Amino acid sequence: MNRFYEAFIIKPGHKVDLSRRNPDETFDFKDKEAALELLAKNNHRIARLQNDLYSEGKQSLLIVLQAPDAGGKDGTINNVFSAMNPQGCRVQSFKTPTSLEQSHDFLWRVHPVVPRRGEVVIFNRSYYEAVLIERVHKFATPEQLEYRYKAINQFEELLEHNGTRIVKFFLHIDKEEQLRRFVRRLKRPEKHWKISANDYPERQYWDDYVEAFEVAMMKCSTKEAPWFAIPANCKWFRNLAVSQIILETMESMRIRLPAPSVDLQETRRLAAIELSRQRHERKNRKPAAKK
Amino acid sequence: MNRFYEAFIIKPGHKVDLSRRNPDETFDFKDKEAALELLAKNNHRIARLQNDLYSEGKQSLLIVLQAPDAGGKDGTINNVFSAMNPQGCRVQSFKTPTSLEQSHDFLWRVHPVVPRRGEVVIFNRSYYEAVLIERVHKFATPEQLEYRYKAINQFEELLEHNGTRIVKFFLHIDKEEQLRRFVRRLKRPEKHWKISANDYPERQYWDDYVEAFEVAMMKCSTKEAPWFAIPANCKWFRNLAVSQIILETMESMRIRLPAPSVDLQETRRLAAIELSRQRHERKNRKPAAKK
């Protein structure tokens, strides 16, 4: 099954050409059913590993999700991560920076919300927006951008040194699929609140976004914090691929249950004392109840 | 099914006597199976309501969980809340206050982590520790405690005024059940990390804790932010009762999907333009591909 990992990873330092990657890819999965079955199995194993990670309390996992609008970030979170125990799993969304956030460096708002030991955190959008939307709309100069790629790599290194594993997913849909999804939203009243005034105007920048994603992934996919470009036109395949890669990542973390923090021998002694005290109490209580 | 709500609510202003409440209660549920089936149904409905709450983005839900050690807070979270979408659901645990936190008032560390609009937040322990453990161990004077009950009610009122619904659960186990669970932990190596050096010494304060819970619930159960004492010796019944009360609470919130933020007519026009542009592009592309 590690072909997902191999097929979709962005090799560190390699040029990325999204036009040569098929967003419709589903390998030999012909229908949803087989994929859903495997997804359920993966989710079950991921939930167990998350439980162990939380118990271990030493390492953590940061999952970065980026995609074009309607690329499926919310859907991926709901389908892959809702199997996790919410205790120890947190979703952090990044919206347009507030004016306070804009008055700081681009990592200022990110640092306080990175995962603590034992935690799995999903970034729905992330600090990469500073080299995506800000590149496309020229909110940053080429020099600033150049520095940011470096700063991102250094920031991720800092987290890794503290025991955080990082995996980054680009959900790869094509421009036609985005339009299909926008049109579908118009037909479903319960999705109307998701429609943004920017949806259509932003489409004119599609190619610029593609280039921005390619450059970011080329410059910031590292051995320790790899980028994956996930074919995402097909939602069930996207969910399966993401879950598979997360499962493999967690399995490679060599999570170990921690040694008990107490003296078990002494604890057994205390338990025995309590049990005998309880028996004694119960015996004394019974005759009283008969009165 | 609203007998759960009625049976376990602490009526505002009423004296609470936990010894008159049966922690083994399971009503007419004789076995786990029927309860699990109903729990799954509840979880499904809760997940839908959570999705609507998130979409609505106006109200929020704060769930406070308190219990004796081994009372089942973690288990409740895993069984009742893992059905929620982690996007929009957050678990906040409160440990022993840090020295920075201790240098502030007892609500200082709480306020920044209350739910934002659209969010469900579960407090695993809470600001109530300031009138529980701190009362039992006399870290606070009677005057301080008296003030804190009032401050808690005022704080909860502040949140309610901003659209936050609050439900508070006391998981009610008895002293014998706690010991059974402690002993069971000793037999399961994967649970050893949960054993604390304080487990047995704290048992001598059992009656003081019961009293502290009774007073806190009496003083701080309000119409808007009620306390529920959930029979929790039986885990599947506990999960079912909590899920049922949360479901009823959410149903009573009259969650409404928000109106779209865009002009749908105009959006349909933009979609039509894009669709025709795309058809045009596709037509022009095809002959080129044949060359």
Image (cartoon, coloured by chain):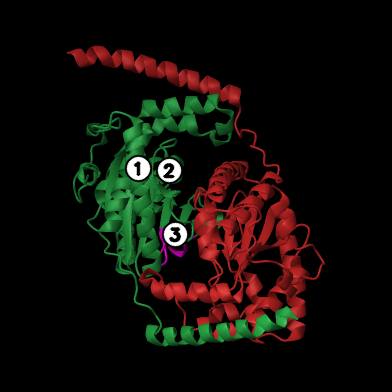
Chain colours: A green, B red
Secondary structure found at label 3: loop
Give me the chain letter of mark 3.
A
Q: Is residue B253 above or below residue B233?
A: above
Circle 3/circle 1 CB separation < 8 Å: no
Quadrant assignment, res B6: bottom right
Circle 1/circle 2 CB separation < 8 Å: yes
Kindly identify which numbered label has been placed on residue A79. 2
- Left or right, B12 with reference to B127: right
Q: Residue at x 61, y 61 (%)?
A: B114
Q: Is residue B186 magenta?
A: no
Q: Is residue A113 magenta?
A: yes
Q: Residue at x 76, y 81 (%)?
A: A291
Q: CA distance from mark 1 to mark 2?
A: 9 Å
Q: Earlier in the sequence, mark 1 or mark 2?
A: 1
Kindly identify which numbered label has been placed on residue A110. 3
Secondary structure found at label 1: helix
Which residue in the protein does label 1 denote?
Answer: A39
Mark 2: give few (<14), some (14-19) or many (20+) Cα within 10 Å: some
Instruction: Name the amino acid type tagged 3.
Output: Val
Residue B235 percent coordinates (x, y):
55, 61
Magenta-colored span: A104-120
Residue A289 percent coordinates (x, y):
71, 79
The one of A90 and A104 positioned closer to us in this rendering: A90
Secondary structure found at label 2: helix
Q: Earlier in the sequence, mark 2 or mark 3?
A: 2
Give me the chain letter of mark 2.
A
- Left or right, B188 with reference to A7: right
